[in-house]
Image (cartoon, rainbow, N blue to C red):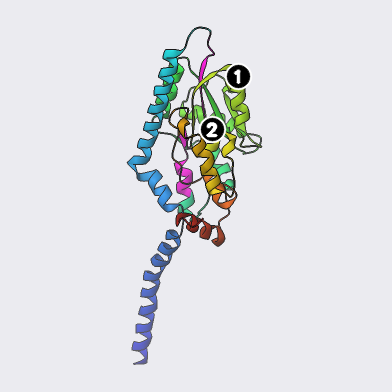
Amino acid sequence: MANLFRKTLTSFVFCSALVGTPALAAEQVSNNPLLYSLAWKQASAEYEALYYQGFNIAKMHVELALAKHKQGDKPLAIVSDFDDTLALPLAYWGHLVNKDIDFFDDAIWDKWIPKNEMVASPGAKEFLEFCHRNGVEIFYITSREQGENTFEYALGNIRHLGFPLKDESHLTVLRESSNKEIRQNEIMKGYDIAVFLGDNLNDFRRKYYIKGDVEGRKKKMKEDRTLFGRKYVLFPNPTDGHWMASIFGESEPEASDKNRAMLKEAAAGIR
């Protein structure tokens, strides 16, 4: 009888381990706040369609600018952000969720950038090549910091994707600041900008750089509501960006129970 009891108990523990381990893993994965956002990025046709839509709109504005352009006018140009606008770091985000990391991780990002594993956004290369063929200059502005090779890494990303680049002066890499407005203003002195492209309001003007104030940032956006789809073309990015700073006070919050609770409150409309 005692042997039977021991065998039964052993079988119960073994079966519990088999059943319990996947359940525990599922529970851990389900707590990752990136899952819905990243699944949408990776799997939805709607995500890709929004990029095609954005570049179609941008192309229409470039075509209109070309039609109106007269001899003696400033040369035409476009100004674009890079990450999550022209190039998608989907493999990076996939790595994070596979490691059960639930917020942007700088150290992993810095090691991933030189690998050149980004893919062109749907419609990006065709749009850029259209601009290049028609003499519309392309200015890339990105905010990154991977040490002394930061600029070379960004240059490598552009070349890897086969994007047009007239010369290195058309690529601006901001290492110590995310304020793109200074460089944008410099470009606007010599060029007529047909359209600005970005996945973050801060890619357009610095006025949107507001931390810890969700409604305040929305208010600033509404002041410029007539510019969206006209001067500004905005692409979707639910995984990261300065919209998070309006919730957490910083755009790259640490993975903590406190921050997960804040995100849940924001999702519930409490904040």
Residue depicted at 52% across the width and 14% down the height: 75
**Furthest-bottom residue in view?**
1
According to the image, label 1 marks what residue? Answer: 189
Is residue 225 visible in the rendered image? The answer is yes
Above or below, comparing residue 18 to residue 231 in the picture:
below
Q: Which mark is residue 121?
A: none
Q: Residues within 10 Å of mark 1 (few under 14, many from 20)?
A: few
Is 146 covered by the magenta stretch? no
Residue 60 position, x and y percent, is 39, 23
Image label count: 2
Q: Residues within 10 Å of mark 2 (few under 14, many from 20)?
A: many
- The magenta span reads 73-95
Q: Earlier in the sequence, mark 2 or mark 1?
A: 1
Residue depicted at 40% across the width and 52% down the height: 36
Above or below, comparing residue 198 to residue 253 in the picture:
above
Foreground pick, 215 / 104: 215
Foreground pick, 16 / 175: 175
Is 86 covered by the magenta stretch? yes
Residue depicted at 34% across the width and 40% down the height: 46
- Quarter in which the N terminus is drawn: bottom left
According to the image, label 2 marks what residue? Answer: 204
Residue type (three-letter) at the residue carrying disc 2: Phe
Residue depicted at 59% across the width and 17% down the height: 190
Is label 2 in a helix, a strand or a loop? loop
Label 2 – label 1 distance at C-alpha: 16 Å
Residue 171 position, x and y percent, is 57, 26
Is residue 115 visible in the rendered image? The answer is no
Is label 1 in a helix, a strand or a loop? helix
